[in-house]
Image (cartoon, rainbow, N blue to C red):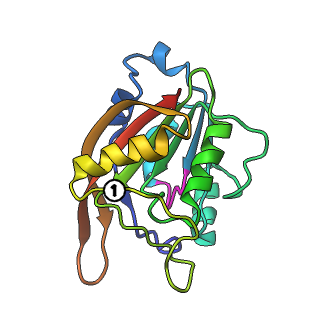
Amino acid sequence: NGLIGRGRMFVYSKAQFKTLLDIESHEESSRFNSLLDIGAGDGSVTERMSSLFKNVYVTELSSAMQWRLSNYGYTVLDADHWQNLTFDVITCLNVLDRCEKPLTLLKQIRQHLNSKIGRLIISLVLPFKPYFEYNNNHYPDETIEIEGDLPEEQINSFLLNVLQPLGFRLKKLTRLPYLCEGDIERSYYFLYDYIFVLEMS
């Protein structure tokens, strides 16, 4: 997908992203200087956010996608080591259910998020079904314990049992359609994303 330009995703528009961050004017956008987009894929979502920031950083496991992202001018960081950088906004979109160590990732995010103005945006498809592509059994090495059957129950469990103990506080919660470019069988895939906007508590 990275080489042939497929696999594009749509999570939110630039206008929706600005609403999530309470940005209504150019002056308000200037308070956020740096963005880290974790698991940026082909950069299609990053592109909708990048114009609001002076410095845009990305991580991605796929070497082909890394190549595309660097061609767009984004700074590609090692997935596990982000140097001594801090970021005003970190986005983690549809990553926690597809990564090897989601709890370690959340702890790393907290260490690198600006403690004063920082915002973390997480998107999750519920019900939560973790799957890690690069392990033979496709199970992640760490498990996020999200309880409940209904989305409302899982959201509450995620907040109380995972995010709050790690030092995050919820600012906004919404649901948006998540579209992903398809394959031979289907032209596109459609799911609902739950979007969490968080700050440090």
Amino acid at circle 1: Glu
In this view, the residue farthest toward the bottom is 136
Label 1 neighbourhood size at 10 Å, few (<14), some (14-19), many (20+)?
some
Instruction: Depth check: give the residue in front, 128 or 31.
Output: 128
Q: Magenta region's main secondary structure?
A: loop
The residue shown at (28%, 83%) is: 184
Q: Is residue 37 magenta?
A: no
The residue shown at (45%, 33%) is: 198
Percent from the top left, x then y, of residue 71? 62, 57
Element class at badge 1? loop
Instruction: Report which residue position mark 1 lands on.
Output: 147
Percent from the top left, x then y, of residue 19? 34, 28
Left or right: residue 102 versus residue 73 is left
Left or right: residue 44 versus residue 111 is left
Magenta part of the chain = 38-43
In this picture, is 197 found above or below 64? above
Left or right: residue 198 versus residue 157 is right
Instruction: Depth check: give the residue in front, 98 or 55.
Output: 98
